[in-house]
Image: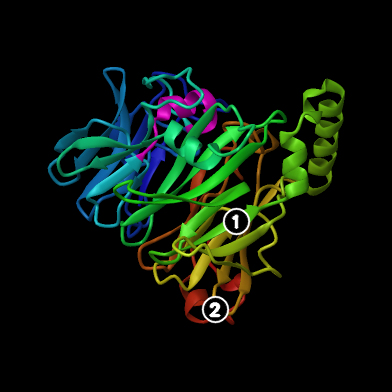
């Protein structure tokens, strides 16, 4: 397993704060962490975007000479190759990567940005010279696929009173064959709400297709054309949030009080639905309406038959981990993780962020249930092989 080791902190990383990148051999009894590199280009939600390129090489982000870059590290030889732009998503064949400018994210979407670095036209709400970049990991080159300005114009260019931003592009993620990717165009409303426009684009950036908007959250690819995405589209609520009413301090204060009361009763639960969305045709259908009742970080298993999900904290500061069988729409809860109140929210909060191993037999999560952030592994092999087995049989 590839992972990170950081000094415990309740704040966002600052320039110079380092994290250790290393591997954990899960075949050994004590599963010790072996550090192989350091990085000062990381945050609590994205890490350093450390990823496997193949069995022998990894890629991670770092800050060198004041720039956010990526580093390809050969585990056998220790040799490193620098790539001139930090990465977000890597294509399944390990050839391509795609990323926004993380310095722009740090300014406008702080918890997902990296400290340091630089960005073109940082003060421009919709720059023409900054956006999403395609990186050729073999050649070590990059190109601007499309700018923030181009995406904003495509989405809002025909509106009589378009929003003014500032805007940013984020979460670009390749599909299962690396021919395209989905991403968000985002902006922040008066009440702090992150408003999303969800797009699909082909790898070369020839087309960018608008798919849906509103509270569009986590997603993962089912196949090259279909994505499983959580969203809530409410014309009434979205219209209110984007209207003039919240510019009144009294109304804004009342609205924030109502939200705080809701969180006290229900925790951080966000209602909506998961959709199976075809990015080519735009057709979509809800899935798991009886059991997928709130927003979660979702990831489909390698065979695409199961989805692992988590929840945000409830009113008792517990996060839940569960499996969802796509065909039967059955949910199997496999863990409950108490979260320290200090890490329930804010830029340093600790979500579970569940991930599958390559064989679809284990999932791992980040949890601070024992006051410090640790990686926990759940063996789910018997459950995915025999779905009738109860969650109590799952070893964690």
Quadrant of res 69:
top left
Residue 128 appears at what percent x and percent y? 39, 27
In this view, the residue in front, 228 or 292, is: 228
Q: Is residue 345 left or right of residue 39?
A: right
User: What x and y, as percent, mark residue 143?
Assistant: 26, 36
Residue 108 counted in the magenta span: yes
Residue sitting nearer the eye, 171 or 370: 171
Q: Pinpoint residue 390: horizontal percent, then vertical percent.
A: 62, 76
Q: Which residue is mark 2?
A: 327
Q: Which secondary structure is most common in the magenta stretch?
A: helix
Vertical relation: 247 (above or below) 387: above
Visible residue check, residue 86:
yes
Can residue 373 be seen in this snapshot? no
- Under circle 2, the secondary element is loop
Q: Which residue is mark 1?
A: 230
Residue 68 vs 284, above or below: the answer is: above
Q: Residues within 10 Å of mark 2 (few under 14, many from 20)?
A: few
Name the one closer to the observer, 138 or 394.
138
Which of discs 1 and 2 lies nearer the camera? The answer is 1
The residue sitting at 72% across, 30% down in the picture is 191
Residue in the image at 50% along x and 36% along y: 152
Residues drawn in magenta? 99-112
- At 45% from the left and 66% from the top, the residue drawn is 222
Q: Position of residue 181 (x, y in %)?
A: 39, 52
């Amino acid at each position: 397993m590839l992972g990170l080791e950081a000094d415990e902190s309740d704040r966002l990383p600052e320039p110079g704060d380092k994290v250790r990148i290393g591997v954990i051999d899960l075949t050994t009894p004590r599963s010790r962490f072996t550090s192989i590199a350091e990085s000062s280009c990381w945050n609590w939600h994205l890490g350093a975007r450390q990823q496997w390129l193949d069995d022998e090489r990894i890629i991670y982000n770092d800050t060198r000479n004041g720039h956010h870059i990526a580093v390809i590290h050969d585990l056998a030889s220790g040799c490193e190759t620098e790539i001139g732009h930090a990465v977000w998503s890597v294509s399944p064949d390990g050839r391509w990567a795609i990323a926004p400018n993380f310095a722009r994210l740090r300014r406008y979407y702080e918890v997902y940005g990296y400290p340091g670095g630089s960005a073109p036209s940082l003060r421009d709400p919709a720059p023409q010279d900054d956006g999403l970049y395609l990186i050729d990991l073999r050649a070590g080159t990059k190109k601007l696929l499309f700018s923030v300005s181009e995406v904003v114009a495509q989405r809002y260019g025909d509106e009589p009173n378009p929003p003014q931003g500032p805007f940013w592009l984020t979460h670009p993620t390749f599909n299962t064959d690396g021919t395209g990717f989905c991403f968000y165009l985002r902006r922040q409303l008066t009440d702090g709400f992150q408003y999303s426009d969800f797009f699909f684009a082909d790898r070369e950036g020839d087309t960018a297709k608008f798919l849906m908007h509103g509270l569009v959250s986590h997603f993962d690819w089912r196949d090259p054309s279909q994505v499983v995405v959580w969203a809530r589209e409410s014309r009434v609520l979205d219209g209110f949030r984007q209207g003039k009413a919240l510019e009144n301090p009294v109304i804004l204060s009342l609205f924030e009080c109502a939200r705080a009361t809701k969180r006290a009763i229900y925790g951080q639960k966000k209602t909506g639905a998961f959709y199976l969305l075809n990015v080519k045709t735009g057709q979509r259908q809800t899935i798991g309406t009886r059991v997928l009742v709130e927003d979660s970080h979702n990831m489909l298993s390698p065979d695409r038959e199961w989805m692992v999900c988590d929840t945000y904290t409830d009113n008792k500061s517990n996060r839940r981990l569960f499996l969802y069988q796509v065909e039967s729409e059955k949910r199997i809860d496999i863990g409950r993780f108490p979260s320290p109140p200090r890490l329930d929210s804010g830029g340093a909060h600790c979500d579970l962020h569940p991930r599958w191993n390559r064989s679809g037999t284990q999932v791992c999560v980040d949890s601070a249930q024992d006051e410090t952030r640790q990686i926990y592994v759940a063996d789910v092999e018997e459950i995915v092989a025999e779905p009738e087995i109860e969650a109590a049989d799952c070893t964690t």
